[in-house]
Image (cartoon, grey):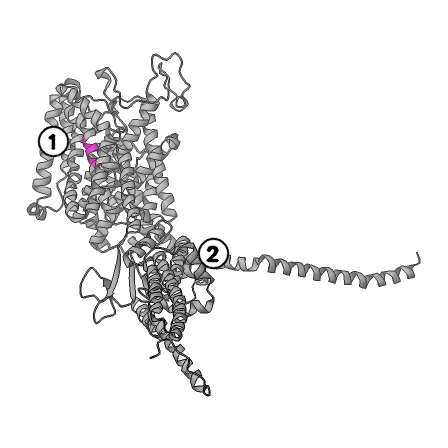
Amino acid sequence: MDPEVRKTLMELNRPRGKFRTQVLKKSQEKVRKNIKTTFKFSGVLKKIRENIPKCSCTSQLSRAFFTELFPFWGIMKKYSIRKYLLADFVAGLTVGIIHIPQGMAYGLLTNLPPVYGLYTSFFPVILYFFFGSSKKISLGTYAVTSLMVGAVVQDKSDLYLRPPNPTQTTTAPSTIVPFLNTTLDTPYSILTLNTTTPPMDTTTRHHPTAADLTDDELRVRVGLAMSVSFMAGFIQLFLGSFRFGGLASFMSDPLISGFTTGAAIHVFTSQVKYLFGVQVYSYHGAFKMIYFYRDFFTVLNQVNPVAAVGSVTTIFVLILIKEGINNNPTCMKRLPVPIPVELFVVIAGTVISHYTRINEKFDVEVVGYIPVGVPAPTVSHLSFIGDVIGDAIAVSFVAFATSYAMAKILAEKDKEEVNANQELVANGMCNVIGALFSSFCCSASLSRSLVQDNSGGKTQVVGLVSSVLVFIVIAYLGPMFSSLPNCILACIVIVTLKGMFHQFRDMVFLWKLCKRDFAVWFVTFLATVILDAGLGLMVGVIFALYFVLRNTQRPYICAMGRVPGTNAYKDLKLSRTLIQIPGIKIFRFDCNLYFANAEQFRDRLYERTGLNPKKLKTKKQKALYKALIQRKREIELAEIEEAAALKKEKKQLLKQKSSIEEDVEKNEDDKELTEEQQTELQLENGEMQARFSRAWIPPVHTVVLDFSVISYVDTVAVKVLSQIIMDFKDVSIKIFLAGCREDVRKIIKKSEFYQTIDYNCLYFTIHEAVVIAQELHQQVGDPPMSPKDVLIVEEESKEASARMTAGEGDGAEEIPQIGANK
């Protein structure tokens, strides 16, 4: 092709391509605009940006986050060495001395060697120093949580370690054998244990103690205890991270008191066999206490006299020094710190047992071998997590509720605050990390916390000092306590339960104060004692939640009246001097409105105010129908009177008039209108209905609902409320809402509430709603007239119009009018 021709064609095609590009861009813009207008993506994105908080990370926010996560930083900033160090050091030594015997005793309570109690008194205490927000509680071993962990260990270890039934010819493959790596001749299998049928041979009823555990049994027990502790800590950490600290409010003080008192009975029961040196099979599951005492009284004739005498002597010494000196107000003023009688008893019992060899001569059970050194962190103990999730939930809630309750009590004493969410995080970190170091689930101890507070402890530096003392025992002095009799540790546990048994006084106090709280306490206590700790807690929570739901279904309601000389309104039942506003009903419902109680709210409103829209609507229809029927009969009567006046047939007039009046009076009963009457009423034109609309007189003209105590309503409640307002509107009664909070106003505004209401019904106070209702009622005019008054007015207007017509006519005859004087 000629280059010139080609160049010419290119120049001609270039503008055309540019034009096509412009057209394509315009079409694309048009399509984008149509998509935006059709799907409204911009509005949706704008609302998403408004509702989602902006994520920003500044130095101030980072500092605030780490200060909340590590409360010790803020505490140590204000720490005064001159004021606090000596007091914390003395209190730390005191608490540490108590930690040693209690840790060993509560370690035995978990069906583990006592040294694991010492681990729990060491690692979690150090961790709580960094993460805890309370300055006064003493974290570590606790009787109730130790009992719950021990129940899991006992229950699950029996399932994993019970030998197979000899009658079985084949054995199912065990899932625990690889974990145990056992070389025993008898294979292990996971079988279902019948908790209600004890073994036939009484000599096998002895549940293995820490002294005679094999390596495989120890691995299973430690694995179960660490697994349930790790999962309990994980649950606490998860709830604390997502700010679920308010869940502690569902466990009320009566519930916790009843549960801990029932758990104290279980703790006492678990230590009875050590007091008397008898061997009793340990049951698990529901009704285990009943079966235990049945077997205990059966073998009571086999009491070990040395263990029994040692137990009685130890309990006597503990009570004598604790009650006679440590808790004596006179002696407390002279003692700088309480006497560590538990430590003295442990040392004395260990020395006597070592030199007299009571384990060999009198068959008294002792603690046994205690390893030396701090355990290394390991995850090999966490192989049973899938089997203990349900138990871990109960353990986590009990441990946190106990710690938080104790922290709150001591904080209120010093006018300080405790962060519930941070306490969840702190307890979770202590249990999660502590489980890796062979520490079972920890919690605050009531006795140690009170000792720490009474000893003058100011901060959690007390925990660091006590941890140093416990570390010395773990690292160097552990084997010295191998000869300690188990009955001595059992005595320490039982004497420590004295504070929990004092909670029986709460039952008497709650009976006098509140029967509902007494019922929660008693049911939780009874379920915990008869069933089990975990089942008892579940029953108590469900029973307490029943009262919460019951309160939403049956809240406090009242009709209100005005206090004379004020703008205040109170329940009419409280005083006879209260004034009920004429024509206005004021109703109060003391509970949030949602789907569960919306219909209950409607029924109670109708009941308390005595205004049922359905019945009122029936009365209104009857009143209108009566007025219409009376109007028709009066028209007929007027025609008859006119004819009778011309023909002077008064007798016929009186007869028909009486029959018409009787026909009208028949419609004054309270029965509903028939279908024919309703059809006849609906067929009347608007002018006739408007003329007789004033024949209906409602009992009141306004109903005021006090919403000042309602902080939440849902969509179901808004629909029910709209329906209530529409039903009352049909009978000429207005509904005003007084004292609505901002959240309630927003929900009402976003719903279709205002589309069904044609007047303003939201007011700030009850008095404002009452004043507006009275003003609106006065603006309407005189009060509604009865049907007879309506007829009189119509007759008078007819007579006036007839006279005017007669006066304008020239020489016309006077037309007789109804009611005219003859």
User: Which label sits on residue 314?
Assistant: 1
Verify whether residue 298 appears in magenta.
no
Q: Position of residue 68 (x, y in %)?
A: 35, 52
Q: Position of residue 362 (x, y in %)?
A: 14, 19
Disc 2 vs disc 1: which is toward the camera?
A: 2
Q: Residue 792: x percent and y percent?
A: 35, 73
Up/down of 54 relative to 124, above or below: below
Q: Amino acid at mark 2?
A: Ile
Q: Main secondary structure of the magenta part?
A: helix
Residue nearest the viewer, comparing 15 with 637 = 637
Residue range (magenta):
262-268
- The Cα–Cα distance between marks 2 and 1, rounded to whole angstroms, is 64 Å
**Mark closest to the chain's N terminus, 2 or 1:** 2
Residue 508 falls left or right of residue 609: left
Task: Inspect the image, locate mark 1, and give the three-letter code of the amino acid beneath it.
Answer: Thr
Say which of 187 and 514 sits in front: 514
Residue ID for mark 2: 52
